[in-house]
Image (cartoon, grey):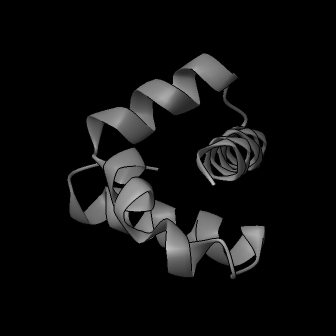
Amino acid sequence: MASDKAQYVVALIAEFAEHYGLTTTQAVEYLSKYKALELYDRQYGYLHTQSFASNVRDISAYCRRMGGAL
């Protein structure tokens, strides 16, 4: 399960980075700063059943609520 979770989060970070024109490193730093990776760690059971497009929208909205600007 941990391997599946890790693979999913890596893919999600890549989708987020591509959507916003960021490098993977920039995406990780942004998602970490605004606690989105912690959210996905806690909510993986539900979130991995949703589309990447939906998750990118949701993660973006979450980061904005936490003070992010993307």
* As drawn, 29 above or below 36: above
* As drawn, 67 above or below 57: above
Left/right of residue 50 with respect to residue 41 in the rendered view: right
Residue 49, x across and y down, in percent: 69, 81
| Residue in the image at 76% along x and 77% along y | 51
Give whichever of 6, 30 is nearer the camera. Answer: 6
* As drawn, 55 above or below 32: below
Q: Quadrant of the N terminus?
A: bottom right
Residue 53, x across and y down, in percent: 75, 71
- Disc count in the image? 0
Residue 31, x across and y down, in percent: 42, 40
Give whichever of 4, 47 is nearer the camera. Answer: 4
* As drawn, 57 above or below 28: below
Please identify the quarter of the rendering in which residue 54 is found: bottom right
Q: Is residue 8 visible?
A: yes
| Residue in the image at 51% along x and 66% along y | 44
Please identify the quarter of the rendering in which residue 6 is found: top right
Residue 55, x across and y down, in percent: 61, 70
| Residue in the image at 68% along x and 42% along y | 3
| Residue in the image at 56% along x and 75% along y | 47
